[in-house]
Image: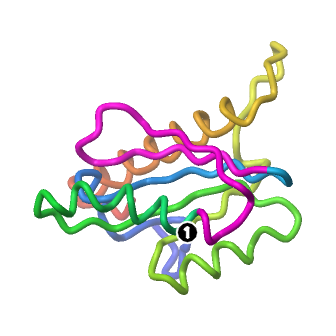
Amino acid sequence: MAKQNDLSRCLVRLEQDATVIAVIEIGQSSWLVVGIVPGLERNPLRKLSPDQDALLPLLHRWQKEPMQAGRTIKSIVAYEAGGDDFWLARWLRGREIEADVIHPSSIPVSREHRRAKTDRLDTELAQTRLSRLAARRTQALQHGGDG
């Protein structure tokens, strides 16, 4: 039985055909942003200066094409928090963009084999994790669960 105020569960279905999902790998010198954009078969990847004013136009551009096709589109941004990166979530939410902050220890990494440590691999791993989470939430809601 779920706790009454269990904030780890989502009660809202994620409409993947109506949601732009962006995952950011935040670095000191640049941000790597990968997106899942409805209607695009490929996942766009952009390297930006570490500046929220460069991020917002990118998110709006990714929303624009599906919106021109008559869809209502929202954006979700997810990123791994480090140091004082929580300001970005507050800034995005102030612009009506959902922001999910991922704790670094919640991203599973195989310790059996060494792997390259690159921003691209990190964003791909976070993107895959977010997509699976969204699919589980949607499936749970379809079956009457609470995600």
Q: Quadrant of the C terminus?
A: bottom left
Residue ID for mark 1: 99
Front residue of this view, candidates 112 and 68: 68
Identify the image quadrant of residue 83. bottom right
Q: Callout 1: helix, strand or loop? A: strand
In screen coordinates, is 74 left or right of 99?
left
Which quarter of the figure has residue 68?
bottom left
Q: Which residues are magenta?
A: 30-54
Which of the colour schemes (rainbow, by chain, secondary structure, one colour) is used?
A: rainbow
Residue 33 in magenta? yes
Q: Residue at x 30, y 53 (%)?
A: 138
- Vertical placement of residue 19 versus 133, above or below: below
Residue drawn 75% across the image and 24% down it: 110
View extreme (left): residue: 70
**Considering depth in this image, is 10 or 121 the residue closer to the camera?**
121
State whether residue 70 is above or below residue 113. below
Residue 59 is drawn in which quadrant?
bottom left
Q: Residues within 10 Å of mark 1 (few under 14, many from 20)?
A: many
94 displayed left or right of 19: right
User: Residue 6 at what x, y percent from top left?
Assistant: 54, 74
Position of the N terminus by quadrant: bottom left
Residue 15 magenta-highlighted: no
* Picture coordinates of residue 52, whole percent (x, y): 65, 69
* Residue drawn at point x = 35 percent, y = 45 percent: 135
Q: Residue at x 59, y 48 (%)?
A: 33
Residue extending farthest to the top is 113
Residue extending farthest to the bottom is 94
Image position, residue 32 (x, y; %) = 66, 45
Q: Position of residue 88 (x, y in %)?
A: 68, 73
Q: How many marks?
A: 1
Q: Mark 1 belongs to which amino acid?
A: Ala
Q: Nearer the viewer, residue 62 or 16?
A: 62
